[in-house]
Image (cartoon, rainbow, N blue to C red):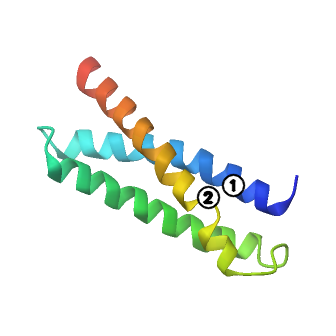
Amino acid sequence: MTPVQQLYWIRVVLGIIAGLFSAFIAFLIGSTADLTTLINAFTIALIVYLISYYALRGVFRDKIEKQSKILSTAVLMYFLIWLPFFVLFYTMLRIYY
């Protein structure tokens, strides 16, 4: 597997983890389902993405030629995976707790 593919799949898994984490935080902070809850959850997902960028930049610095590719690889996939998993986990938390 190439380093770009590894980075892609790491971002997919991080999108799922960020969906779980942001759903849990949104459940704890927000008592109603409104726009503020979604904005807070999106902010958490963005923070997780930026933290993962700095962590992965050190890992893939010598393996990928263009350093901008580390930031842009799978950014859309990250958020497209995060959104349905956030909705799924948040709904499960609201129903079962």
- How far from the left and from the top, in percent, is residue 40? 25, 56
Mark 1: few/some/many CA within 10 Å (<14, 14-19, 20+) = some
Mark 2: few/some/many CA within 10 Å (<14, 14-19, 20+) = some
**Label 1: element kind:** helix
For residue 89, above or below residue 4 = above
Residue for badge 1: 8
Q: Are marks 2 and 1 in contact (CB under 8 Å)?
A: yes
Q: Quadrant of residue 52?
A: bottom right
Which residue is pictured at 20% across the width and 48% down the height?
37
Going by the numbered disc 2, the residue's amino acid type is: Ala
Disc nearer the start of the sequence (2/1): 1
Apparent side of residue 69 relative to residue 4 in the rendered image (left or right): left
**Label 2: element kind:** loop
For residue 52, above or below residue 31 = below
Apparent side of residue 41 relative to residue 16 in the rendered image (left or right): left
The dot on residue 74 is 2
Apparent side of residue 92 relative to residue 27 in the rendered image (left or right): right
Residue 17 in view of the camera: no
